[in-house]
Image (cartoon, rainbow, N blue to C red):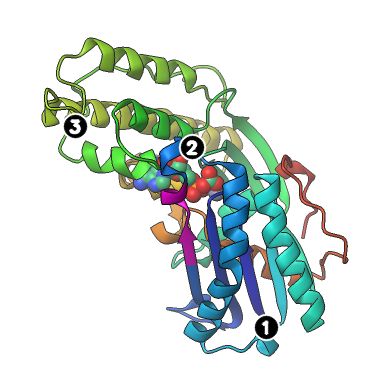
């Protein structure tokens, strides 16, 4: 089954084709993907402007689809089904992909299905080289979500913990902004941290002894105060690259320590031995390496998608769509997008 996946929930237009008949040792079914990032479009505004995002998705969907079909050497008639992101996300942005996908499927007389964006992230590691079997604990860390989930099957999700304020990615983005680094902050903090000392400054590891929920607002304030109180931390001519790298590394270390400790706790609490990490922040190399070291100590394994499939993309939507479609699920002709959508409301497969 060839599934076209469409992701337009925020500021990336992602399209991909997943082919279940191409699943092999080296090829996990991903025929090809195209991704257009609107980062530059929103750069001057300090965040994503929803209306600009929607308009740009509309402009890009058709040319990107043509580019994808040419790249994969697949014609429209060979597509068997279409999966689009139905939520959560920016309502206008979601509507562009959903209406485009639903109409195209109607025109081609093939089924269509709306996919939960975070389920796309959660299942993306199953397309990887080392796919984990259910059940597993999943750490979903993106720009809008920080969730620890016990996943017992597709659509069988129990929320173990979540952020009571900012999401992990949002915290990376805000810390980056305070250091005058461009959006998205995560990769830029990670790059600056490479030459820094992670123990240079003491930052809080919030809520470590309080269950499996997270809170990052205190850490954000601590970074703000650290930058304010530390000479030469600015990006101007007075700034010292080593001081800035030390701040970035100390911040990243505090984030990684907090996330890793909660993951270990969740594994112990559930008795599970596999951890899946997904979402943009799971592309962070330091997080991946620390998890591998710490989980090895408790005989648990960590599984993640290749970095390109950690951030928003169409492939994860195509794959999640395939899993649900092959179980007989599909949406009718009505298009309804859901800006807020708890994962626990998803039907099991
Ligand atoms: O999943 P994603 O692409 O979009 C959302 O659904 O939100 O996640 C984006 C988030 C941003 O906050 C970005 O700064 C963060 O993921 N991110 C990273 C890295 N790459 C992306 N954070 C830390 N380290 C990275 N290497
Ligand atoms: Zn995402």
Which residue shows up at 30% across the image and 36% down it? 181
Image location of residue 339, percent across then percent down: 72, 43
177 over 90 or under it: above or below: above
Inter-mark Cα distance, 2 to 1? 35 Å
Residue 330 in sight in this render: yes
Which residue has dot 2 on it? Answer: 47
Which residue has dot 1 on it? Answer: 79
Structural crowding at the residue carrying mark 2, measured as other residues with C-alpha within 10 Å and reported as few (<14), some (14–19) or many (≥20): some
Which residue has dot 3 on it? Answer: 245
Looking at the image, in which quadrant does ligand 1 appear? top left
For the residue pair 77 and 277, the one nearer the viewer reads as: 77
User: To which quarter of the image does residue 260 belong?
Assistant: top left
Structural crowding at the residue carrying mark 3, measured as other residues with C-alpha within 10 Å and reported as few (<14), some (14–19) or many (≥20): many
Question: Magenta region: which residues?
Answer: 35-41
Say which label, 2 or 1, has the lower sequence index.
2
For the residue pair 344 and 90, the one nearer the viewer reads as: 90
| Left or right, 205 with reference to 240 | right
Image location of residue 6, percent across then percent down: 62, 65
Which residue shows up at 77% across the image and 50% down it? 346
The answer to whether residue 38 is magenta is: yes
Say which label, 1 or 3, has the lower sequence index.
1
**Label 3 residue SS:** helix
**Label 1 residue SS:** loop
| Cβ of mark 3 under 8 A from ligand 1 | no
**Label 2 residue SS:** loop
Mark 2 vs mark 3: give the one in front. 2
Number of marks in the image?
3
């Amino acid at each position: 089954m060839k599934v076209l996946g469409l992701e337009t929930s925020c500021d990336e237009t992602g399209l991909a084709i997943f082919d279940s008949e191409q699943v092999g040792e080296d090829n996990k079914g991903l025929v090809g993907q195209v991704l257009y990032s609107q980062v530059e479009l929103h750069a001057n505004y300090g965040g994503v402007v929803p209306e600009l995002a929607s308009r740009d998705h509309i402009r890009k969907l058709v040319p990107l689809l043509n580019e994808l079909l040419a790249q994969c050497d697949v014609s429209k008639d060979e597509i068997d089904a279409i999966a689009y992101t139905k939520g959560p996300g920016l309502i206008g942005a979601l509507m562009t992909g959903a209406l485009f996908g639903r109409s195209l499927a109607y025109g081609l007389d093939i089924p269509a299905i709306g996919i939960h964006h975070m389920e796309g992230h959660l299942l993306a590691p199953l397309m990887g080289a080392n796919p984990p079997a259910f059940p597993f604990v999943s750490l979903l860390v993106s720009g809008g979500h920080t969730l620890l989930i016990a996943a017992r099957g597709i659509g069988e999700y129990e929320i173990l913990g979540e952020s009571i304020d900012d999401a992990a990615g949002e915290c990376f983005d805000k810390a980056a902004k305070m250091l005058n680094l461009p959006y998205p902050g995560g990769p830029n903090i990670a790059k600056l941290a490479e030459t820094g000392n992670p123990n240079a400054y003491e930052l809080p590891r919030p809520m470590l002894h309080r269950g499996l929920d997270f809170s990052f607002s205190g850490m954000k304030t601590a970074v703000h105060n650290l930058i304010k109180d530390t000479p030469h931390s600015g990006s101007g001519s007075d700034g010292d690259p080593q001081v800035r790298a030390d701040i970035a590394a100390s911040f990243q270390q505090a984030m990684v320590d907090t996330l890793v400790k909660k993951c270990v706790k969740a594994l112990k609490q559930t008795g599970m031995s596999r951890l899946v990490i997904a979402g943009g922040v799971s592309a962070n190399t330091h997080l991946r390496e620390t998890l591998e070291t710490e989980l090895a100590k408790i005989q648990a394994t960590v599984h993640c998608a290749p970095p390109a499939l950690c951030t928003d993309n169409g492939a994860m939507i195509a794959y999640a769509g395939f899993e649900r479609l092959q179980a007989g699920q599909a949406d009718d002709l009505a298009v309804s997008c859901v800006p807020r959508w708890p994962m626990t409301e998803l039907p099991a497969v």
